[in-house]
Amino acid sequence: MKIELDRIAKDTNLFLKNFLKKQNSSKLIPAMKYGLFPGGKKIRSKILIDIGYLLSINYKTLIAVGAAVECIHAYSLIHDDLPCMDNDKIRRGKPSTHIKFGESTAVLAGNSLLTMAFEILSSPNFKVSEKIKINLIKKLSQCAGHAGIAGGQYLDLSYEKKKISKNKIIEMEIKKTGKLFSFCCAAPAIIKKKAKKEIKFFEILGSKIGLLFQIADDLIDFKGSSKKAGKKTGKDQKKGKATLISLLGYNNAVKYCDKIIFDANNKFKKYGSNSKNISETLNYILKRDK
Ligand code: GRG
Protein backbone atom coordinates (compact mmCIF):
# COMPACT_ATOMS: atom_id res chain seq x y z
CA MET A 1 0.00 0.00 0.00
CA LYS A 2 2.72 2.47 1.05
CA ILE A 3 4.83 1.65 -2.05
CA GLU A 4 1.80 2.14 -4.31
CA LEU A 5 0.97 5.47 -2.60
CA ASP A 6 4.58 6.63 -3.05
CA ARG A 7 4.52 5.67 -6.75
CA ILE A 8 1.29 7.61 -7.32
CA ALA A 9 2.71 10.61 -5.42
CA LYS A 10 5.84 10.48 -7.60
CA ASP A 11 3.87 10.29 -10.85
CA THR A 12 1.50 13.09 -9.77
CA ASN A 13 4.45 15.31 -8.80
CA LEU A 14 6.18 14.58 -12.11
CA PHE A 15 3.03 15.55 -14.02
CA LEU A 16 2.77 18.81 -12.04
CA LYS A 17 6.47 19.62 -12.45
CA ASN A 18 6.21 19.19 -16.23
CA PHE A 19 3.01 21.24 -16.33
CA LEU A 20 4.67 24.05 -14.35
CA LYS A 21 7.74 23.95 -16.62
CA LYS A 22 5.50 24.88 -19.57
CA GLN A 23 4.01 27.90 -17.76
CA ASN A 24 5.39 31.38 -18.36
CA SER A 25 7.70 32.18 -15.47
CA SER A 26 6.30 34.23 -12.60
CA LYS A 27 7.36 35.24 -9.11
CA LEU A 28 4.52 33.16 -7.64
CA ILE A 29 5.77 29.81 -8.93
CA PRO A 30 8.23 29.17 -6.03
CA ALA A 31 5.43 29.61 -3.48
CA MET A 32 3.08 27.43 -5.58
CA LYS A 33 5.74 24.68 -5.74
CA TYR A 34 6.35 24.99 -2.00
CA GLY A 35 2.65 24.41 -1.32
CA LEU A 36 2.39 21.57 -3.84
CA PHE A 37 5.40 19.36 -3.46
CA PRO A 38 7.40 18.51 -0.37
CA GLY A 39 5.71 16.13 2.02
CA GLY A 40 2.13 15.80 0.72
CA LYS A 41 0.83 12.24 0.76
CA LYS A 42 -1.28 12.58 -2.43
CA ILE A 43 -3.95 10.36 -0.87
CA ARG A 44 -6.68 11.93 -3.03
CA SER A 45 -4.84 10.81 -6.17
CA LYS A 46 -4.60 7.31 -4.66
CA ILE A 47 -8.38 7.19 -4.16
CA LEU A 48 -8.85 8.33 -7.78
CA ILE A 49 -6.54 5.57 -9.03
CA ASP A 50 -8.25 2.92 -6.85
CA ILE A 51 -11.73 3.85 -8.08
CA GLY A 52 -10.45 4.30 -11.64
CA TYR A 53 -9.08 0.74 -11.44
CA LEU A 54 -12.58 -0.55 -10.63
CA LEU A 55 -13.82 1.09 -13.84
CA SER A 56 -10.76 0.17 -15.97
CA ILE A 57 -9.61 3.72 -16.66
CA ASN A 58 -6.22 4.52 -18.10
CA TYR A 59 -3.60 5.38 -15.43
CA LYS A 60 -2.24 8.45 -17.26
CA THR A 61 -5.71 10.00 -17.52
CA LEU A 62 -6.25 9.49 -13.79
CA ILE A 63 -2.87 11.05 -12.92
CA ALA A 64 -3.87 14.22 -14.80
CA VAL A 65 -7.17 14.43 -12.89
CA GLY A 66 -5.33 13.70 -9.62
CA ALA A 67 -2.86 16.51 -10.38
CA ALA A 68 -5.79 18.95 -10.74
CA VAL A 69 -7.24 17.75 -7.43
CA GLU A 70 -3.87 18.11 -5.68
CA CYS A 71 -3.66 21.74 -6.90
CA ILE A 72 -6.98 22.49 -5.20
CA HIS A 73 -5.94 20.57 -2.10
CA ALA A 74 -2.62 22.47 -1.87
CA TYR A 75 -4.51 25.74 -2.34
CA SER A 76 -6.90 24.88 0.48
CA LEU A 77 -3.99 24.05 2.83
CA ILE A 78 -2.13 27.30 2.04
CA HIS A 79 -5.28 29.32 2.75
CA ASP A 80 -6.25 27.17 5.75
CA ASP A 81 -2.96 28.06 7.46
CA LEU A 82 -3.40 31.83 7.03
CA PRO A 83 -3.86 33.99 10.16
CA CYS A 84 -7.46 34.79 9.14
CA MET A 85 -8.24 31.04 8.95
CA ASP A 86 -6.65 28.44 11.27
CA ASN A 87 -3.44 30.41 11.78
CA ASP A 88 -0.92 27.56 11.60
CA LYS A 89 2.79 28.16 11.32
CA ILE A 90 3.87 24.59 10.52
CA ARG A 91 2.65 22.37 7.69
CA ARG A 92 4.23 19.12 6.47
CA GLY A 93 7.04 19.62 8.97
CA LYS A 94 8.08 23.01 7.51
CA PRO A 95 7.04 26.64 7.92
CA SER A 96 3.60 27.24 6.34
CA THR A 97 3.63 29.01 2.96
CA HIS A 98 2.69 32.43 4.41
CA ILE A 99 5.48 32.14 7.02
CA LYS A 100 8.02 31.37 4.31
CA PHE A 101 6.81 33.77 1.58
CA GLY A 102 4.58 36.31 3.33
CA GLU A 103 0.82 36.53 3.54
CA SER A 104 0.01 38.28 0.26
CA THR A 105 2.20 35.88 -1.75
CA ALA A 106 0.55 32.90 -0.03
CA VAL A 107 -2.95 34.19 -0.89
CA LEU A 108 -1.97 34.74 -4.53
CA ALA A 109 -0.09 31.44 -4.86
CA GLY A 110 -3.19 29.69 -3.47
CA ASN A 111 -5.44 31.42 -5.96
CA SER A 112 -3.05 30.52 -8.78
CA LEU A 113 -3.15 26.83 -7.78
CA LEU A 114 -6.95 26.89 -7.80
CA THR A 115 -7.07 28.25 -11.34
CA MET A 116 -4.27 25.92 -12.48
CA ALA A 117 -6.47 22.93 -11.58
CA PHE A 118 -8.95 24.03 -14.24
CA GLU A 119 -6.17 24.79 -16.71
CA ILE A 120 -5.00 21.16 -16.34
CA LEU A 121 -8.50 19.79 -16.97
CA SER A 122 -9.10 22.01 -19.99
CA SER A 123 -5.68 21.40 -21.55
CA PRO A 124 -5.53 19.88 -25.07
CA ASN A 125 -2.96 17.42 -23.65
CA PHE A 126 -5.65 15.94 -21.41
CA LYS A 127 -7.04 13.35 -23.77
CA VAL A 128 -10.74 12.97 -23.03
CA SER A 129 -13.71 14.40 -24.97
CA GLU A 130 -14.72 18.07 -24.55
CA LYS A 131 -18.02 16.94 -22.98
CA ILE A 132 -16.20 14.90 -20.33
CA LYS A 133 -13.84 17.83 -19.65
CA ILE A 134 -16.80 20.16 -19.05
CA ASN A 135 -18.49 17.62 -16.77
CA LEU A 136 -15.28 17.17 -14.74
CA ILE A 137 -14.71 20.93 -14.48
CA LYS A 138 -18.31 21.50 -13.44
CA LYS A 139 -18.16 18.85 -10.71
CA LEU A 140 -14.76 20.00 -9.41
CA SER A 141 -15.80 23.67 -9.24
CA GLN A 142 -18.96 22.70 -7.33
CA CYS A 143 -16.86 20.68 -4.86
CA ALA A 144 -14.39 23.55 -4.27
CA GLY A 145 -16.87 26.42 -3.91
CA HIS A 146 -19.45 27.64 -1.41
CA ALA A 147 -21.34 24.33 -1.45
CA GLY A 148 -18.08 22.44 -0.92
CA ILE A 149 -14.66 23.17 0.56
CA ALA A 150 -15.04 26.94 0.97
CA GLY A 151 -18.54 26.58 2.46
CA GLY A 152 -17.34 23.81 4.81
CA GLN A 153 -14.43 25.96 5.96
CA TYR A 154 -16.88 28.79 6.69
CA LEU A 155 -18.95 26.44 8.87
CA ASP A 156 -15.83 25.08 10.60
CA LEU A 157 -14.77 28.58 11.63
CA SER A 158 -18.25 29.67 12.66
CA TYR A 159 -18.78 26.55 14.85
CA GLU A 160 -15.74 27.27 17.07
CA LYS A 161 -16.56 27.32 20.80
CA LYS A 162 -20.22 26.42 20.17
CA LYS A 163 -22.25 23.31 20.95
CA ILE A 164 -23.01 21.80 17.54
CA SER A 165 -25.19 18.77 16.75
CA LYS A 166 -23.76 15.55 15.26
CA ASN A 167 -25.56 16.06 11.94
CA LYS A 168 -24.24 19.60 11.59
CA ILE A 169 -20.67 18.49 12.34
CA ILE A 170 -20.98 15.72 9.74
CA GLU A 171 -22.39 18.17 7.17
CA MET A 172 -19.49 20.59 7.82
CA GLU A 173 -16.83 17.84 7.57
CA ILE A 174 -18.34 16.41 4.39
CA LYS A 175 -18.24 19.88 2.80
CA LYS A 176 -14.81 20.91 4.08
CA THR A 177 -13.01 17.64 3.35
CA GLY A 178 -15.45 15.12 1.90
CA LYS A 179 -16.36 16.99 -1.27
CA LEU A 180 -12.90 16.69 -2.78
CA PHE A 181 -12.92 12.94 -2.08
CA SER A 182 -16.41 12.86 -3.54
CA PHE A 183 -15.01 14.34 -6.74
CA CYS A 184 -12.17 11.76 -6.74
CA CYS A 185 -14.69 8.91 -6.60
CA ALA A 186 -17.12 10.45 -9.11
CA ALA A 187 -14.48 11.49 -11.69
CA PRO A 188 -13.78 7.94 -13.00
CA ALA A 189 -17.54 7.38 -13.45
CA ILE A 190 -17.81 10.72 -15.29
CA ILE A 191 -14.88 9.74 -17.56
CA LYS A 192 -16.56 6.38 -18.20
CA LYS A 193 -19.80 8.25 -19.13
CA LYS A 194 -21.79 6.34 -16.52
CA ALA A 195 -25.47 7.10 -15.85
CA LYS A 196 -26.30 9.87 -13.34
CA LYS A 197 -27.39 7.29 -10.76
CA GLU A 198 -24.01 5.54 -10.81
CA ILE A 199 -22.12 8.85 -10.64
CA LYS A 200 -24.23 9.71 -7.57
CA PHE A 201 -23.39 6.31 -6.03
CA PHE A 202 -19.66 7.11 -6.26
CA GLU A 203 -20.17 10.69 -5.07
CA ILE A 204 -21.91 9.54 -1.88
CA LEU A 205 -19.27 6.88 -1.29
CA GLY A 206 -16.58 9.55 -1.75
CA SER A 207 -18.16 11.89 0.76
CA LYS A 208 -18.17 9.05 3.34
CA ILE A 209 -14.50 8.34 2.59
CA GLY A 210 -13.75 12.06 3.01
CA LEU A 211 -15.60 12.07 6.31
CA LEU A 212 -13.51 9.07 7.40
CA PHE A 213 -10.36 10.96 6.36
CA GLN A 214 -11.38 14.06 8.35
CA ILE A 215 -12.26 12.09 11.51
CA ALA A 216 -8.90 10.27 11.23
CA ASP A 217 -7.25 13.70 10.89
CA ASP A 218 -9.06 14.82 14.06
CA LEU A 219 -7.90 11.62 15.83
CA ILE A 220 -4.31 12.56 14.92
CA ASP A 221 -4.88 16.05 16.29
CA PHE A 222 -6.28 14.54 19.51
CA LYS A 223 -3.67 11.86 20.20
CA GLY A 224 -0.95 12.08 17.56
CA SER A 225 2.58 13.43 17.74
CA SER A 226 3.30 16.83 16.17
CA LYS A 227 6.64 15.49 14.94
CA LYS A 228 5.12 12.57 13.04
CA ALA A 229 2.10 14.58 11.78
CA GLY A 230 4.33 17.41 10.54
CA LYS A 231 1.89 19.94 12.00
CA LYS A 232 0.89 21.11 15.44
CA THR A 233 -1.44 18.63 17.19
CA GLY A 234 -3.77 19.25 20.14
CA LYS A 235 -5.14 22.39 18.49
CA ASP A 236 -8.79 21.40 18.12
CA GLN A 237 -9.44 21.25 21.85
CA LYS A 238 -7.63 24.56 22.45
CA LYS A 239 -9.61 26.31 19.73
CA GLY A 240 -12.90 24.71 20.77
CA LYS A 241 -13.38 23.11 17.33
CA ALA A 242 -16.60 21.18 16.79
CA THR A 243 -15.52 17.62 15.89
CA LEU A 244 -17.04 14.16 16.32
CA ILE A 245 -14.37 13.53 18.99
CA SER A 246 -15.42 16.58 21.01
CA LEU A 247 -19.03 15.39 20.77
CA LEU A 248 -18.77 11.56 21.03
CA GLY A 249 -15.33 10.98 22.57
CA TYR A 250 -12.26 9.31 21.08
CA ASN A 251 -13.40 5.66 21.24
CA ASN A 252 -16.82 6.32 19.75
CA ALA A 253 -15.23 8.37 16.95
CA VAL A 254 -13.00 5.35 16.13
CA LYS A 255 -16.09 3.10 16.15
CA TYR A 256 -17.80 5.55 13.78
CA CYS A 257 -14.82 5.23 11.40
CA ASP A 258 -14.91 1.41 11.60
CA LYS A 259 -18.57 1.54 10.57
CA ILE A 260 -17.80 3.79 7.56
CA ILE A 261 -15.10 1.33 6.42
CA PHE A 262 -17.42 -1.67 6.94
CA ASP A 263 -20.25 -0.05 4.95
CA ALA A 264 -17.92 1.08 2.14
CA ASN A 265 -16.40 -2.41 1.85
CA ASN A 266 -19.91 -3.85 1.52
CA LYS A 267 -20.62 -1.44 -1.35
CA PHE A 268 -17.35 -2.44 -3.07
CA LYS A 269 -18.16 -6.18 -2.82
CA LYS A 270 -19.71 -6.20 -6.29
CA TYR A 271 -16.26 -5.49 -7.77
CA GLY A 272 -14.78 -8.70 -6.29
CA SER A 273 -11.01 -8.89 -5.83
CA ASN A 274 -10.54 -5.64 -7.84
CA SER A 275 -11.66 -3.73 -4.74
CA LYS A 276 -8.65 -4.94 -2.71
CA ASN A 277 -6.72 -1.68 -3.37
CA ILE A 278 -9.49 0.69 -2.26
CA SER A 279 -10.14 -1.44 0.86
CA GLU A 280 -6.45 -1.24 1.79
CA THR A 281 -6.50 2.53 1.25
CA LEU A 282 -9.47 2.91 3.62
CA ASN A 283 -7.63 0.97 6.35
CA TYR A 284 -4.52 3.09 5.76
CA ILE A 285 -6.57 6.29 6.15
CA LEU A 286 -7.70 5.26 9.63
CA LYS A 287 -4.38 3.82 10.82
CA ARG A 288 -2.03 6.56 9.53
CA ASP A 289 -0.12 8.81 11.90
CA LYS A 290 0.36 11.74 9.48
C1 GRG B 1 -12.06 26.87 -1.72
C2 GRG B 1 -10.29 25.14 -2.07
C3 GRG B 1 -10.83 26.24 -1.25
C4 GRG B 1 -10.18 26.61 -0.10
C5 GRG B 1 -10.43 27.76 0.76
C6 GRG B 1 -9.13 27.30 3.59
C7 GRG B 1 -10.25 26.62 2.95
C8 GRG B 1 -11.12 27.39 2.01
C9 GRG B 1 -10.55 25.33 3.18
C10 GRG B 1 -9.78 24.45 4.07
C11 GRG B 1 -10.22 23.07 3.94
C12 GRG B 1 -9.30 22.13 4.66
C13 GRG B 1 -7.88 22.51 4.85
C14 GRG B 1 -9.73 20.97 5.10
C15 GRG B 1 -8.87 20.02 5.82
C16 GRG B 1 -8.67 18.80 5.04
C17 GRG B 1 -7.51 17.99 5.54
C18 GRG B 1 -7.77 16.97 6.59
C19 GRG B 1 -6.30 18.21 5.06
C20 GRG B 1 -5.08 17.41 5.30
O1 GRG B 1 -4.91 16.61 4.15
P1 GRG B 1 -3.69 15.61 3.94
O2 GRG B 1 -3.40 14.90 5.22
O3 GRG B 1 -2.50 16.59 3.61
O4 GRG B 1 -3.99 14.76 2.76
P2 GRG B 1 -1.09 16.29 2.91
O5 GRG B 1 -0.11 17.16 3.66
O6 GRG B 1 -0.76 14.84 3.01
O7 GRG B 1 -1.25 16.74 1.50
Image: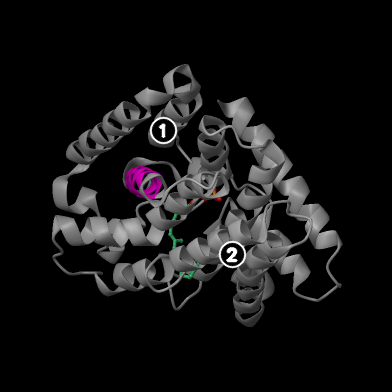
Q: Which residue is mark 2?
A: 134
Residue 40: image x %, image y %? Answer: 60, 48
Nearer the observer: mark 1 or 2; the answer is: 2
Residue 53: image x %, image y %? Answer: 56, 31
Q: Which residue is mark 1?
A: 282
Residue 7: image x %, image y %? Answer: 68, 33
> Who's the residue at 67% across and 78% down the image?
105
Look at the image and give the residue range highlighted in magenta. Answer: 200-219
Marks 1 and 2 sit apart, C-alpha to C-alpha, by 29 Å
At label 1, the amino acid type is: Leu
Residue 234 is left or right of residue 251, and the answer is right
Up-down: is 126 above or below 134?
A: above
Q: Is residue 133 magenta?
A: no
Mark earlier in primary sequence (1, 2): 2
> Who's the residue at 70% across and 67% down the image?
119
Q: Is mark 1 within 8 Å of ligand 1?
A: no
